[in-house]
Image: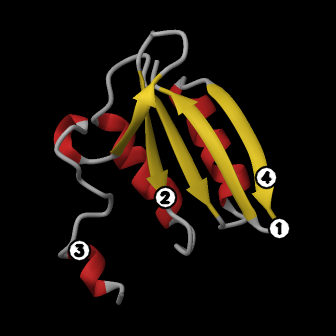
Amino acid sequence: MSIFSRFTKPLIAQPAEAPGGSVTAVEDRPDGSGRQYRLDTIGQVCPFPLVEAKQAIKSLDVGDELIIDFDCTQGTDSIPHWAAAAGYPVTNFEQVGDATWTITVQKA
């Protein structure tokens, strides 16, 4: 995929059940206080994981969580800093492979 095709195709998968059609629905949160959605940015260079996360969280309801999978090392700093600055709690952040991470951000 070329950089130019990013502007003609949706940045995130768009299933029918996703709010605003911008993220992939995963499941209801275990405590029943919202839903979880997944954003897969594996293979994207920085700053695209952060750019897509900012765009995706706009369509979520307060209390919903966005699970962001990424392999951009700069994202290990930029995504948590953005979440903190925006007032979004990080409910999970872990390394899941040699150079792959997952972070869960709750929309507040």
Between 75 and 101, the one nearer to me in the picture: 101
Place of residue 43 in the rendered image (x, y in percent of width and height, measured from the top left): 55, 75
* Residue topped by disc 3: 7
Q: Which mark is residue 3?
A: none
Instruction: Say which amino acid is labelled 4.
Output: Gln
Task: Tell me, yes or no, whether the two marked residues, 4 and 3, touch with CB atoms within 8 Å.
Answer: no
Q: Is residue 58 above or below residue 77?
A: above
Q: Earlier in the sequence, mark 4 or mark 3?
A: 3
**For the residue labelled by badge 1, is the local secondary structure a helix, a strand or a loop?**
loop
**Residue at the extreme bottom:** 2
Write down the residue under mark 1: 98
Amino acid type, mark 2: Asp
Query: Which marked residue is nearer to the observer: mark 4 or mark 3?
Result: 4
Using residue 28 as the reference point, say whether residue 8 is left or right of it: left
**Label 1 to label 4, Cα distance in Å?**
8 Å
SS assignment at label 4: strand
Mark in the foreground, 3 or 1 = 1
Left of 14 or right of it: where is 12?
Answer: right
Task: Identify residue type, mark 3.
Answer: Phe
Position in image of residue 12 (x %, y %)? 33, 58
- Residue at 46% across / 18% down in the picture? 108
Gap between marks 3 and 1, in whole Å?
30 Å
Q: CA distance from mark 3 to mark 2?
A: 17 Å
Given contact means CB atoms under 8 Å apart, are the residues at marks 3 and 1 in contact?
A: no
The label number, if any, that marks residue 95 in the structure image: 4
| Residue 38 screen position, x and y as percent | 46, 45
Upstream in sequence: badge 3 or badge 1:
3
For disc 2, the neighbor class at 10 Å (few under 14, some 14 to 19, many from 20) is some
Q: Which residue is mark 2?
A: 40
Q: Are marks 4 and 2 in contact (CB under 8 Å)?
A: no
Assess disc 1: are there few (<14), some (14-19) or many (≥20) residues with their C-alpha within 10 Å of its C-alpha.
few
Question: Circle 3 sits in a helix, a strand or a loop, which is it?
Answer: helix
